[in-house]
Image (cartoon, rainbow, N blue to C red):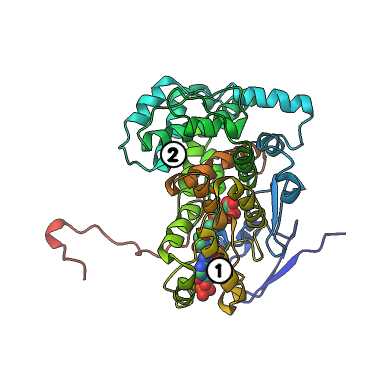
């Protein structure tokens, strides 16, 4: 018995077509049989920004936007954040299962022994202007890593892939810290293999001179939780880039640089920095109504609000909000939290936001914590890129192992000029 599918009636020709349905999807290629004339190209699906297109099958992360659910390899984010370390979650995303104690110990040791970068990277980093944006430095430097590791081109060799993954997971905090230290004119600090992932990162950022530096355990733990929350998120914009660049068999360094470039945009990972700029502009709780009105007049976009998938509260934002209180016990309360809480309170009661199902997303509160921890807004997206590198790499290797996948090359609806003959220069007229 044939599994029920779609029966399509083309009113232009009176023809009928059976389109098989699997996983509540039709294969777009099954549309191509629908033609008016036999030599037509055939039907396509038009989906700008891929709002309703499944680009792949994936077993890594799943989001239920209506219910505000996020799971990594089936584990709810609420059960992972605070219980599993970031490197434990990184292992889960990359390998598919939570590691045993021995597996975790080996994994942490391997990542830890890949935190150093080639000394020439420092010369590369020194070439940037003193006020270069850390994301611009990170993106360029990650791409430059591909020139240090030509073996990364062996993307079909599992051992070569594993080595590049260890290098990228291990080196991202080092590159991020170097970018920050360069932007504030401080010497680079080498990684300390005796510290955990977040603690080592904090030390590379904040160690001054020959003074010893011990990361505050509460801040290191809070950062580790934030890394867990930012690790992966289905086929978001930057992950789509990682898969697309990787689909041409480019090496993982340039693919990761491309993904980080997409993340940099203020509509994506750059939103955490944009939220702080927005809160600074609003300036005080009593100016919130004025800005809510500007949003409703379409003159202002509430950064850190709204999401393509979540039509409910982003579960990560809820956890971040709770983590903020733990951080503020150490750093003191960030007064910008009061403006953010008032924005949320007003927005969640206002019909404009309720109708559009606009809720705080992962970026709404993260910047407030980062600022309280001493990070400047221009490094916030770098803090997003570090953990998301694990998600990008997990998605990249899944794409390479998927027999359904090949080089990504979308089609288009052509709206340009019909065929026309070349015009010699003497006969050309300025365009109207
Ligand atoms: C991330 O995809 C992911 O998973 C991303 C991410 C991840 O982990 O990888 O979750 C990380 O990128 C989070 C999102 C961070 N970006 C922001 O906070 C920027 C502000 N948010 C928006 O720009 C917007 O909500 C997006 C980009 C996040 C989603 O945009 P969509 O899905 O394309 O929605 P839309 O722009 O079509 O908006 C739908 C309606 C529109 O109103 P109408 O035209 O129907 O009247 O909602 C309005 C929009 O104007 N709207 C907003 C709004 N977001 C959407 N109005 C005011 N403020 C906002 N933030």
Q: Residue furthest left?
A: 426
Question: Which element is circle 1 on?
Answer: helix
Question: Which element is circle 2 on?
Answer: helix
Q: Residue at x 48, y 34 (%)?
A: 205
Quarter of the picture holding the N terminus: bottom right
Within 10 Å of disc 2 (Cα), the crowding (few <14, some 14-19, many 20+) is many
Where in the figure is residue 53, as x and y percent of width and height? Answer: 61, 58
Specify whether 244 is left or right of 131.
Answer: right
Specify whether 349 is left or right of 336.
Answer: right
Residue at numbered disc 2: 139
Quarter of the picture holding the C terminus: bottom left
Specify whether 329 is left or right of 380.
Answer: right
Res. 41 in view: no
Say which quarter of the image contains residue 2.
bottom right
Q: How many marks?
A: 2
Residue at numbered disc 1: 342
- The mark nearer the N terminus, 1 or 2, is 2
Q: Residue at x 59, y 45 (%)?
A: 330
Q: Observer-nearest residue: 109 or 72?
A: 109
Res. 110 in view: yes
Q: Is residue 29 above or below residue 431?
A: above
Where in the figure is residue 269, as x and y percent of width and height? Answer: 51, 51
Q: Observer-nearest residue: 115 or 254?
A: 115
Q: Is residue 287 above or below residue 156?
A: below
Q: Observer-nearest residue: 37 or 382?
A: 382
Within 10 Å of disc 1 (Cα), the crowding (few <14, some 14-19, many 20+) is some
Circles 1, 2 touching at the beta carbon (< 8 Å): no
Say which quarter of the image contains residue 140.
top left
Where in the figure is residue 199, as x and y percent of width and height? Answer: 59, 32
């Amino acid at each position: 018995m044939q599994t029920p599918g779609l029966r399509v009636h083309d009113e232009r020709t009176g023809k009928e077509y059976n389109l098989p349905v699997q996983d509540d999807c039709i294969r777009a290629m099954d549309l191509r049989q629908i033609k008016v004339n036999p030599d037509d190209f055939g039907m396509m699906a038009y989906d700008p920004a891929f709002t309703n297109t499944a680009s792949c099958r994936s077993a890594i992360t799943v989001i239920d936007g209506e219910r505000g659910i996020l799971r990594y390899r089936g584990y709810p984010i609420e059960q992972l954040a605070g219980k599993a370390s970031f490197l434990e979650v990184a292992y889960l995303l990359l390998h598919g299962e939570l590691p045993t104690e021995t597996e975790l110990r080996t994994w942490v040791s391997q990542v830890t022994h890949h935190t150093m970068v080639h000394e020439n990277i420092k010369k590369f980093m020194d070439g940037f202007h003193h006020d270069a944006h850390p994301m611009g430095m990170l993106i360029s430097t990650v791409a430059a890593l591909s020139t240090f590791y030509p073996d990364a081109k062996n993307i079909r060799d599992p051992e070569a892939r594993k080595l590049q993954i260890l290098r990228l997971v291990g080196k991202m905090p080092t590159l991020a810290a170097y970018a920050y230290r360069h932007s504030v004119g401080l010497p680079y600090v080498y990684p300390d293999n005796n510290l955990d992932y977040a603690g080592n990162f904090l030390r590379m950022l904040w160690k001054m001179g020959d003074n010893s530096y011990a990361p505050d355990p509460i801040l290191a733990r809070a950062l580790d939780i934030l890394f867990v929350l930012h690790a992966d998120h289905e086929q978001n914009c930057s992950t789509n880039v990682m898969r697309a660049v990787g689909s041409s068999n480019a090496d993982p360094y340039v693919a990761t640089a491309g993904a980080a470039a997409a993340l940099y945009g203020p509509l994506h990972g750059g939103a955490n920095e944009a939220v702080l700029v927005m809160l600074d502009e609003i300036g005080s709780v009593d100016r919130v109504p004025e800005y809510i009105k500007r949003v409703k007049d379409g003159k202002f976009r509430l950064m850190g609000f709204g999401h393509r998938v979540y039509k409910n509260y982003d579960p990560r934002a809820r956890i971040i909000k709770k983590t903020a209180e733990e951080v503020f016990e150490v750093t003191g309360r960030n007064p910008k939290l009061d403006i953010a809480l008032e924005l949320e309170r007003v927005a969640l009661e206002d019909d404009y936001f309720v109708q559009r199902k606009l809720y705080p997303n992962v970026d709404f509160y993260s910047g407030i914590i980062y600022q309280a921890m001493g990070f400047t807004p221009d490094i916030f997206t770098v803090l997003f890129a570090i953990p998301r590198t694990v998600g990008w790499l997990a998605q990249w290797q899944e794409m390479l192992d998927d027999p359904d996948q090949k080089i990504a090359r979308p089609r288009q609806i052509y709206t340009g000029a019909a065929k026309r003959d070349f015009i010699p220069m003497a006969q050309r007229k300025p365009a109207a």
